[in-house]
Image (spheres, coloured by chain):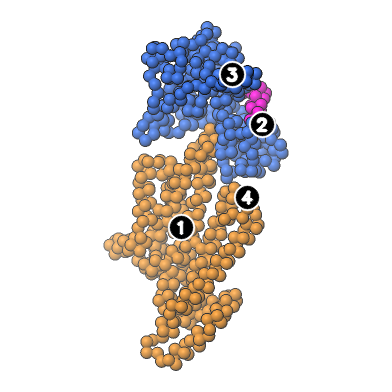
């Protein structure tokens, strides 16, 4: 594999993250004053100034920016104005919850969606195809928050068999998992189907059949590895969005993860926390894209030899 | 004379697409004897490739095949799916027109070749690898062990076709169907591939069906020729007879439209007027009748059958065949 190809990719990824952090830093400071959001309305001018000097908000913006980067490089993401605790501690509590929920949703979706898409492609225009694709369209066109509430109504309110909020037991994960999983199943299975359909007409599939291979070997050994390439992209995109994708779902199910933390921190203008989460969010997207690029190289040998790639 | 290894009779193929039925092959009869090289020749769309894919039943679910295809006495059209799978690659192998896209782009040459070898022989992976190297050697690939590690896109079209041939040989088949094996390749490579096929036929005694639109390829490489037109066999003859005394007006037209080295420069090339009728608009009676100078009233009414013209091996489907 071309080492320059990957070094180029990594450099570009780092550059993107620097841009994102800078952008968030500027936008958060340009759109409002944390002192006003944090302190009570009747706070005196003195209180406000004290708050500002305590958090370094009275310094010029470029100095704050320099200090901010210096701290990041030291692994210090600042203190939460609200909790008065290091951001890293808060993240260490919240992040595993989000990763747990979202990873499980994606794994659940992949296990169901890929065989479903293959099945639909092999039975094109039959009842099986229409039924599975109908379910898929339902899955990804249904807004998360709406489906989540419907599931709560059914399983928590009406049937009273599953809890509607929190994360204390394995039962708590079922509803959020179903809600996010269904949306992912929708998009993964449609991609798998269309990708399979285009691959099944390729001459090398005819070669494999003419050589005497069994149907399963042709489908899973020859067609699927080729069809997987675009499917990997879409899975990679959702992996990259695990933090962003958790915002709505965690709010609906009161799941104590990073997504919910972001929503409350934005409301409170808790700058350090928001900055850290947005940074994390961009890191996951950029890293997931990087991994997808590398996976491409592994799955499709033709990409590896192209100089530089895109 | 050798006995027939494969007999295709009364073969018809319809494709059902979007509620319509398209007739790709009307009535094709041909046979292949042991160790023989036969040629199927005709323009694109005449049904030569479809007929051969029907033998291995690889046309897909939209195709409906009728008639009879007998291989060593077994009716291939009656076999179960697992039955026909034992024929594919093991008894009858096939190579295709575009060798580069006919190989799986995400798998190494070696793994594709070894997969087929192990499917047909139950060798250990070590011996299968050795066999793969020896097969690549047999098809004239230099440094075969290194080539196993290559992906198809790293090889030229000619090399890919050699790999395809090696894969076809993996099951040690009795018949090789070569569907326009050189059409996508340039002329020098074309000659190399054809001589390779000839050598394999000689050395292994493997019968070969060569599908082509190129009469030059036919003249140099095959023993018997079947000329197809609009999904029908219109003439069958040993190759020398076909070129010396073509009987069907279509064959005669094809030969007249062919330039020759020995020709008088003044002799014009004569094209066949008109176009091949599409499957939906086939004319009544003889399919060639609208383009034929010899056509009479009977040609408008009846499709002539393939009949022997004196000597048993020369047949034509024409009321006005020239003997």
Which residue is depicted at the point 38% across and 19% down?
B284
Q: Quadrant of residue B194?
A: top right
Report the residue marked by disc 2.
Answer: B188
Q: Is residue B64 magenta?
A: no
Distance Cα–Cα, label 4 vs label 3: 52 Å
Q: Nearer the viewer, mark 4 or mark 3?
A: 3
Mark 1 and 3 residues: CB-CB less than 8 Å, in contact?
Answer: no
On screen, residue B27 versus residue A15, left or right, reads left
Q: Residue A113: image x %, image y %?
A: 43, 51
Which residue is depicted at the point 65% across and 36% down?
B159
Asked if both marks, 1 and 4, belong to the same chain, the answer given is yes
Chain coloured blue in this rendering: B
Report the residue marked by disc 3.
Answer: B267
Q: Nearer the viewer, mark 2 or mark 3?
A: 3
Q: Secondary structure at mark 3?
A: loop
Q: Earlier in the sequence, mark 2 or mark 3?
A: 2
Q: Is residue B194 magenta?
A: yes
Range covered by the magenta-colored residues: B189-207
- Circle 1 crowding by C-alpha within 10 Å: few under 14, some 14–19, many from 20: many
Report the residue marked by disc 1.
Answer: A106
Q: In the current view of this chain or complex, which residue is farthest to the front?
A: B266
Distance Cα–Cα, label 1 vs label 4: 31 Å
Q: In the current view of this chain or complex, which residue is farthest to the right?
A: B143
Q: In the current view of this chain or complex, which residue is farthest to the left?
A: A158
Distance Cα–Cα, label 2 vs label 4: 28 Å
Chain coloured orange in this rendering: A
Q: Callout 3: residue from which chain?
A: B
């Amino acid at each position: 594999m071309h080492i320059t190809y990957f070094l180029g990719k990594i450099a570009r990824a780092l550059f993107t993250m620097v841009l994102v952090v800078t952008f968030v830093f500027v936008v958060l400071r340009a759109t409002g004053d944390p002192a006003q959001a944090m302190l009570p309305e009747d706070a005196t001018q003195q209180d406000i100034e004290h708050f500002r000097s305590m958090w370094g908000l009275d310094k010029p913006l470029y100095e704050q920016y320099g200090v901010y980067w210096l701290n990041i490089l030291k692994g210090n993401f600042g203190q939460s104005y609200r909790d008065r605790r290091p951001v890293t501690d808060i993240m260490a509590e919240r992040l595993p919850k989000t990763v747990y929920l979202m990873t499980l949703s994606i794994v659940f979706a992949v296990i169901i969606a890929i065989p479903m898409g293959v099945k639909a492609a092999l039975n094109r225009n039959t009842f099986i195809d229409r039924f599975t694709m109908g379910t898929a369209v339902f899955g990804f066109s249904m807004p998360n928050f709406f489906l989540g509430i419907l599931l709560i109504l059914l399983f928590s309110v009406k049937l009273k068999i599953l809890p509607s909020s929190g994360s204390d037991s394995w039962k708590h994960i079922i509803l959020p998992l179903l809600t996010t999983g269904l949306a992912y199943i929708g998009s993964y299975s449609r991609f798998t189907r269309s990708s399979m359909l285009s691959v099944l007409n390729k001459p090398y599939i005819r070669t494999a059949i003419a050589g005497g291979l069994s149907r399963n070997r042709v489908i899973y050994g020859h067609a699927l590895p080729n069809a997987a390439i675009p499917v990997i992209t879409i899975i990679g995109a959702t992996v990259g969005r695990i933090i962003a994708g958790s915002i709505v779902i965690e709010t609906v199910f009161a799941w104590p993860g990073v997504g919910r933390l972001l929503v409350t921190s934005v409301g409170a203008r808790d700058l350090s926390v928001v900055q850290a989460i947005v940074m994390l969010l961009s890191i996951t997207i950029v890293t997931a894209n990087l991994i997808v690029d590398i996976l491409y190289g592994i799955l499709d040998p033709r990409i590896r030899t192209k100089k530089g790639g895109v | 004379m050798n006995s027939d290894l494969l007999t295709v009779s009364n073969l018809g193929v319809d494709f059902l697409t979007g509620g319509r039925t398209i007739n790709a092959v009307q009535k094709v009869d041909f046979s292949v004897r042991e160790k023989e090289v036969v040629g199927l020749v005709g323009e694109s769309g005449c049904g030569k490739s479809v007929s051969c894919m029907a033998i291995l039943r690889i046309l897909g679910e939209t195709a409906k095949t009728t008639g009879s295809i007998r291989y060593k006495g077994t009716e291939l059209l009656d076999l179960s799916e697992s039955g026909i799978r034992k024929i594919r690659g093991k008894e009858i192998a096939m190579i295709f027109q575009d060798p580069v896209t006919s190989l799986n782009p995400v798998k190494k040459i070696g793994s594709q070749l070894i997969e087929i070898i192990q499917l047909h022989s139950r060798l250990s992976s070590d011996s299968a690898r050795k066999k793969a190297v020896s097969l690549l050697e047999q098809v004239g690939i230099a440094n075969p062990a290194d080539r196993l590690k290559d992906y198809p896109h790293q090889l030229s079209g000619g090399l890919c076709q050699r790999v395809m041939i090696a894969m076809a040989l993996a099951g040690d088949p009795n018949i090789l169907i070569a569907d326009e094996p050189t059409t996508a390749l340039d002329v020098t490579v074309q000659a190399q591939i054809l001589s390779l096929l000839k050598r394999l036929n000689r050395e292994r005694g493997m019968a070969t069906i060569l599908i082509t639109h190129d009469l030059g390829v036919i003249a140099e490489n095959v023993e018997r020729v079947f000329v197809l037109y609009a999904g029908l066999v219109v003439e069958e003859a040993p190759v020398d007879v076909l070129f010396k005394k073509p009987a069907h007006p279509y064959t005669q037209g094809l030969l007249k439209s062919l330039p020759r080295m020995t020709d008088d420069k003044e002799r014009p090339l004569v094209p066949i007027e008109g176009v091949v009728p599409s499957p939906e608009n086939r004319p009544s009676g003889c399919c060639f009748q609208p383009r034929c100078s010899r056509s009479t009233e009977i040609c408008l009414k009846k499709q002539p059958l393939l009949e022997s013209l004196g000597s048993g091996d020369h047949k034509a489907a024409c009321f006005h065949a020239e003997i």
